[in-house]
Amino acid sequence: MGIPISLWPMLFVAAFFGVYLRNGNVFPFLHKPELPIHLTNHPLRHYSDFVSVNLSHQLLDLVKEVQTYNTNSNDLVNLTRTYEHIGEAEPRLDNGMCRNSLHVPSKDGKMCHLPNRFDVAYHHMKYGGIEGMKEGYDTLASRIFTFGNYLFDLEKYPAMKEIFNEPKFIAAAKEVCPENRQFLDPYQYHLIIQVPGQALPVHIDAPFFTDASRFHYPIWLLAVMTASGLYKQTFIDQVQVVINLHEWTDPSVGGDFIYVPNNDVGPIFLPARPRSATVVDGSKVMHATKLYRPEAELPMLSRNKKNVLEYNKVDDTWELRSDGHLLQRYATDDLRITTVYRARCFESQAARDSYDAFLKNSSEENGIRPVAEIVAELKAELVRRKQVPASSLDKLSLDELAVTFVEEFIRYPVPQTWLPYNYCVLPKLYPILIPILSPLCTL
Ligand SMILES: [Fe+2]
């Protein structure tokens, strides 16, 4: 006996939503990007075989020599900011938790406020990354706790010094700097490692302005400032050179560099081939990496624990530990490894020196604008764009205002899926939904 014809539409709808909710990626290119126009059509160069095989081996040895890598979310914890928050901070609860689920503990552990990359974390959780993953909060967080280490003294690392001083390298970096700003001011050398199952969420890099930087304000606010277009006059161009140091060659494992050039095309994927390089100003081009080895078992990394990836010379393996407890062991070839060179672009050495002096001497007492002044300017711009009375924004808490700033100004691209929202994070806010969503989600 067949199914009564009257039930067919209902079955069709049920099957449709089953496929839709489980996969969410049946049809591509459903949501055109809506990037701010001034963050589109910036140069990006990609070079195959940018580094020789010999130098690449030396660089990989250097990665092992550096040995210990903390999660990038814990990087620069020693950095002191003039303003840690925009005024949303509130005391931490007696049980050590933060009342607001968007907040994280402050540097001194006494308060809770929005995380430094609130813009990135908020978008990643809401949409499940550029792939539109439907996953719970803890899984998605573990995917982005990648590992890194900074090299401050290049004299200690001759291979690194060699590559960053090669004329070919300097020329490639200068191609991305504006023509009238060809003086490179390198400020950071970073080694980044992703274990299988990890990705870099879509973001713009921390920008610098002539009167503002990560030393003064939370980076999420600086990203909002960049995207708002209100501060173009004080924006400092920069360049990042990302070089792949791993030796695996199979493009099917993912890990591609992804960027969104403009609003007319979808995200562009550049395979993470060994020895290749990507050169871009990451503070004005939205970028990410594709999930690396998505099928791999992902170690769960709590942000409240000390997560360390460490090279073990004895057996040439890498050990991932969380509060000292061994979670996973990897071969070097299991890892996606890159080095990132970052430099600001100035008109001259004098301009660089003067900015250097500003960074060294600026403080709340010494010329840094109160954060409330910037918030007020962004609010005024919101009023203008949304054509709403200013009083309607006054009703918002500062946390709600931060969400509105990120949504309205930054506009990170949403996944190319029918339902771009990651409903699997809802149980974090509403535990009552766990039984309903657990069959559909990796919670
Ligand atoms: Fe970046």
Image: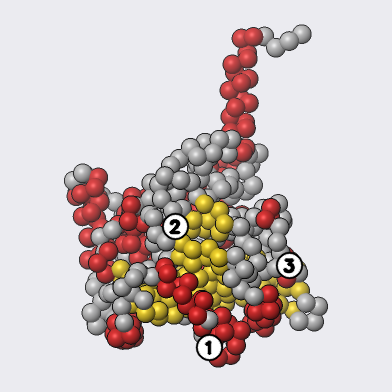
Quarter that holds the N terminus? top right
Q: Position of residue 242 (x, y in %)?
A: 54, 69
Label 1 crowd bin: few (<14), some (14–19), many (20+), radius 10 Å: few
Pointer 3: what residue?
Answer: 333
Residue occupying the point 24% across, 67% down: 233
Disc 1 from disc 2: Cα separation? 29 Å
Q: In the shown orientation, is residue 7 left or right of residue 189? A: right
Three-letter amino acid code of the residue under disc 3: Asp
Is 323 located above or below residue 131 in the figure? below
Residue 40 visible in image: yes
Q: In the shown orientation, is residue 31 left or right of residue 49? A: left
- Residue nearest the viewer, comparing 410 with 13: 410
Q: In the shown orientation, is residue 155 left or right of residue 382? A: right
Three-letter amino acid code of the residue under disc 2: Met
Pointer 2: what residue?
Answer: 286
Is 408 located above or below residue 65 in the figure? above
**Between disc 1 and disc 2, whose residue precedes?**
1
Residue 338 visible in image: no
Extreme residue toward the bottom, this view: 155
Pointer 1: what residue?
Answer: 153
Is 319 located above or below residue 230 in the figure? below
**Between disc 1 and disc 3, whose residue precedes?**
1
Residue occupying the point 50% across, 70% down: 241
- Residue nearest the viewer, comparing 311 with 107: 311
Residue occupying the point 36% across, 56% down: 39
Q: Dots 1 and 3: beta carbons under 8 Å? A: no
Q: In the shown orientation, is residue 405 left or right of residue 240? A: left
Q: Position of residue 398 (x, y in %)?
A: 32, 57
Q: Secondary structure at mark 2?
A: loop
Residue occupying the point 28% across, 58% down: 229
Q: Secondary structure at mark 3?
A: helix
